[in-house]
Amino acid sequence: MIAADVFGYGWWIAARAAGIVAILLVSASVGLGLAMATKPERRRPGMAVVLRRLHQYVALGALVAIAFHGLFLLLDPWLRPGLAGVAVPFALGYRTFFTGLGVIAAWSAAALGLSYWLRDRIGRERWTTIHRLTLAAYALALIHVIGAGTDGGSAWLLAILALALLPLPTLAVRRLLSHEREQERRAAARARAATRRPAAAGPDGRRATPRRPVGHGL
């Protein structure tokens, strides 16, 4: 009887395990992405390449884990979600709100992750702006993990999620500060370039010289 129960819930356990692996890999991918965008000028030569490749591999691993999470749910004889249940937001009758957020998070992660190979067509700046939505997809995934699973309130799962989340706020703050400093540097560079720009030539081909304002002394 125990063996039958274990077999009956095996796909659910496998799906839950794949989901937990997926959220941990997404956490690592988000952390690496924030680290890549923070203080790049202080990194050792070649470190940017290492971080970028590691970020890519971890993100792809997360997508594979998400795919297995959905596949194992399809095979679960108790839930029986059907293809629509795992692919269409809010189509599943079981904990509809939380499972719907999970479907949205999964599709968002897939679109944002695979968009890396289309960034040249999208445009680097536009792609960077779109890629920031990863944080929103990550937040939806966390809510899904806690709200949809039977062990969402378990101390062990909350402890794992807390450890995965621990470095992210610091990295996010550093990323914002780094972005602000970069904006200030660019503004200062534009201002310096404007002051060094030569004066426009007059009708006779000579460069115009600024006139001294009347009444302002030397």
Image (cartoon, rainbow, N blue to C red):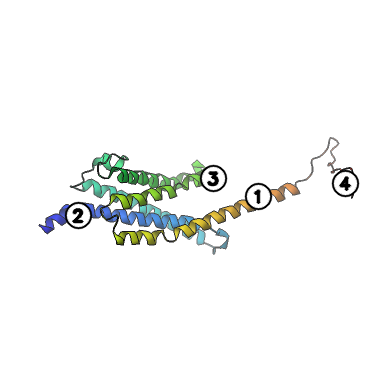
**First in sequence: mark 3 vs mark 4:** 3
Residue underneath mark 4: 216
Residue sitting at the far left: 1
Which residue is at a point 22% across and 52% down the rendered structure image? 12
Disc number at residue 187?
1
Q: Residues within 10 Å of mark 2 (few under 14, many from 20)?
A: some
Secondary structure under the numbered disc 4 in the rendered image: loop
The three-letter amino acid code for the residue at tag 2 is Gly
Label 3, label 1: how far apart the Cα atoms are: 17 Å
The one nearer the camera, 115 or 209, is: 209
Distance, label 2 to label 3, CA atoms, is 45 Å
Q: Is residue 6 left or right of residue 139?
A: left
> What is the distance, in whole Å, between disc 4 and disc 1 at their CAs?
30 Å
Element carrying mark 2: helix
Q: Quadrant of the N terminus?
A: bottom left
Q: Looking at the image, tell me whether mark 4 or mark 1 is earlier in sequence order.
A: 1
Viewed as shown, does residue 25 lie left or right of 116? left
